[in-house]
Image: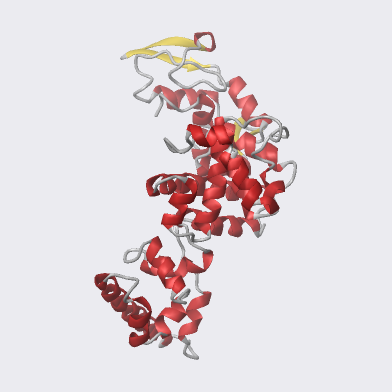
Amino acid sequence: SFNSIALIDWTLDIISSGLATDIDGLNRVFSATFYAKGNVIPSGDNVTLSGACPERSREVEGSRGTLSAFDFEPILETLMELSLIKLTPESGQWTTTALGKATAGSGLSVNEAKCFASKLESGYPQTLFGWLALALSSPEWSPPPGFLTRLEIAHESPLKMLYQHFDSCLDQTRFLLPENHRSESLSYQTAAALKALLLLDSWCRMMPIQRLEEQFQVHLGQIVSLAETVSHLIKSLAAIVGAREKDSPLIEELQDYAFQIRFGLSIEFWPLHYRLNLILNRTDFICLKEAGIESIVTLCEISEDDLDNSLKTRLSKNKLHLLKEKIATIREEEFMSSLNTNPPRRINSLSSVRPDTNYRAS
């Protein structure tokens, strides 16, 4: 809303959408909003539209109250310095750069884009764990309520867990941990981000919910909320990489990783999740993994007796029934598809098919 968005973010969004390409256009778009009616709105790089900064605005009388015309020039200069927009001298129009489009399109704030771009200048993370650490270094990320207890802060539990169980990943936490973290206590934000890093890494590795709750002292709602937020940040990082290197293989790797973080499943379960997510939850997919079923191929080739023997003690009777119906549907779809190809496709061709979802770049 206009009460929370920074004016510099609003400006980038409007230019990216094509609604305005110059200062007159920006003022014209804003003057047409309901919020502009009867308000004197501030300007500036980092203030919200509801803040106070009258020296950068001028009042003009409107038919329904007071409107503001902003001094957009400092904002446009800042966006250009950050390589988010560019000016076409011949026409005098502003347009977004590839990085600007990625920032606006992924929903990042200008402050977050500046932070990520600056850190990436020192080199890309070498592991997905490192990319996760980078995402959690966002200046605007905040942990779920009650995520970190006072006892954990006092005992430096996240840092101790890092040393005990993730010592091989220490160098990949450089985006999170300050250089003096061995001699000084971590801030609440840094400790929470470190805990989130370790939690989500285990979540992606399909650690059962009960073990996650016991080990990290969190509940499922907090994990899901965290996963949704951070998967979005990973997708945004993929967009930034795409703006810098259009054909980088990292783009697809990060999009895959966003899926893993969002749903707490390994990437091999993508096709299964796509087909079965209305029937099975994460715990059920873990049951499939324990039964040796990790692909559509395996699921469709297993006999009904073997399916019963493998899953009747792991899934409810109703879920097992729905799963059998879905298997029959998939087999029929594959058979019908094979009639349209020459030579006919075998069912194991499904393993190479990755369905499109919102986690693929548009």
Q: Horizontally, is 36 left or right of 252 in the view?
A: left
Give the x, y percent position of residue 40.
42, 13
Residue sitting at 40 percent across and 47 percent down? 219
* x 42%, y 56%: residue: 209
Q: Nearer the viewer, residue 94 or 165?
A: 165
Can you see residue 326? yes
The colour mode here is secondary structure
Is residue 320 positioned above or below 242 on the image? Answer: below
Q: Nearer the viewer, residue 105 or 144?
A: 144
- Residue 331 at what x, y percent from top left? 37, 83
Q: Is residue 264 left or right of residue 75?
A: left
- Residue at 70% x, 35% y is 182
Viewer can see residue 362: no
Furthest-bottom residue in this view = 343
Q: Quadrant of residue 160?
A: top right
Q: Is residue 257 left or right of residue 213?
A: right
Residue 273 at x, y = what percent?
42, 66
Image vertical order of residue 7 relative to residue 156, above or below: above
Residue 314 at x, y percent in the picture:
35, 71
Q: As drawn, which residue projects farthest toward the right?
A: 122
Camera-side residue of 43 and 297: 297
In the picture provided, is 323 more to the left or to the right than 172?
A: left
- Please tell me how many numbered marks the rendered image carries: 0
Q: In front here: 255 or 71?
A: 255
